[in-house]
Image (cartoon, rainbow, N blue to C red):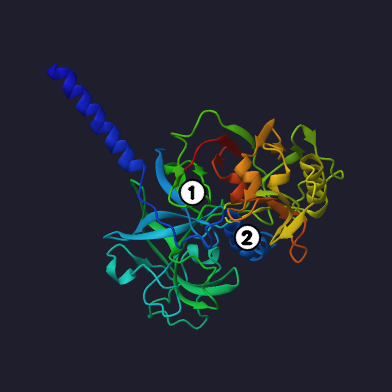
Amino acid sequence: MATTTTTILLLLLVAATAVSAADLSVYHNVHPPSPSPLESIIALARADDARLLFLSSKAASSGGVTSAPVASGQTPPSYVVRAGLGTPVQQLLLALDTSADATWSHCAPCDTCPAGSRFIPASSSSYASLPCASDWCPLFEGQPCPANQDASAPLPACAFSKPFADTSFQASLGSDTLRLGKDAIAGYAFGCVGAVAGPTTNLPKQGLLGLGRGPMSLLSQTGSTYNGVFSYCLPSYRSYYFSGSLRLGAAGQPRNVRYTPLLTNPHRPSLYYVNVTGLSVGRTWVKVPAGSFAFDPATGAGTVIDSGTVITRWTAPVYAALREEFRRQVAAPSGYTSLGAFDTCFNTDEVAAGGAPPVTLHMDGGVDLTLPMENTLIHSSATPLACLAMAEAPQNVNAVVNVVANLQQQNVRVVVDVAGSRVGFAREPCN
């Protein structure tokens, strides 16, 4: 009996240790803009245009398992993860960005940075300023060393500037120990923001973790630690006080994942392109013009999986066809109205329960991603109103890119395997 009791206690201890390593505390940046999911999404999606412009930019970016919970942040990108930086460790909430490579943090002193926690380099014994001659400097598009540099004088730090949404910031390049869950990554190169020019509303409050696939990204800097694999599961905007997870490394990824090939665009090397072959509403395939989903590196056309855009945007001909079929099947007696970015809103009292059909994304490799209904239809809590939670790509940005956004990814495990050149999807209750 004593042996059995001891065994049970050991198993509980191991389980508790595993949970503590995998489930870290996470926090939201701000409270949802509105108690109504519909009004909240409309408010959050107002920053999508700047995000889509970033995704459409033609400028090229020159192990074990770790799981860190993810929670909805309310500034683009929309989700944050708890990370540690420095020695002794300083805790930060970093925005997850699958379409950016560089990691950066607001650093003290900085009079123009957003209010909140800032990394203090002077308080970290492991922090090192990287000079302009560092191999990292050109990757971050840092300023070159002065031509008339005195050979006996120390080299200046690598300085760079970066636009973000409707603002920009200036940073210096440094390295320190980055801690994600139980893992400590020594000598991690990141930007230390010292000044912000412009509004800070759409700027992550404490920093950003770059999960793209360029040379400065987390995957590139960690090499064999994570073997180019990570996944994330985003909680619903309706579950503000719940968290999802970011899982790093091939171990622990779900087995029921269906994979589609990952495509590479040399003009936009950080982005995760996939080949969408079609859409269906209910059991009906949406009729779109030939070539509507074609991947073209020269123009940037194709479909990107992005964690920072709020609502999925389809190019004009694709969205028009999707909207027409969705409206045909819903058949709302009073017709449809527009609200914010949404143009297919209807009175739910006039539509039979379950009357809204599911939307499925079809991709290469036989992947059929049927969206959960809460990812397809957003309801108002104040009125009997619901809207199709997708929109047409704005015409003032590159209108050839389809973007599968975070609202449509909620409660879906997205597995990115850069080494295997594939992206996978599996339904999972992330909350």
Task: Give the x, y percent position of residue 93.
Answer: 41, 59
Return the residue at label 1: 239
Q: Is residue 75 above or below residue 14?
A: below
Decide which of 290, 419 is in the foreground and name it. Answer: 290
Q: Secondary structure at mark 1?
A: loop
Q: Is residue 430 above or below residue 95?
A: above
Picture disc at residue 42:
2
Task: Name the side, left or right, on which 233 lies relative to 396.
Answer: left
Q: Residue at the front extreme? A: 349
Q: Quadrant of residue 214?
A: bottom right
Decide which of 166, 59 is in the foreground and name it. Answer: 166
Decide which of 77, 311 is in the foreground and name it. Answer: 311
Q: Secondary structure at mark 2?
A: helix
Alpha-carbon span between mark 2 and mark 1: 17 Å
Residue in the image at 38% along x and 60% along y: 92
Residue in the image at 58% along x and 56% along y: 308
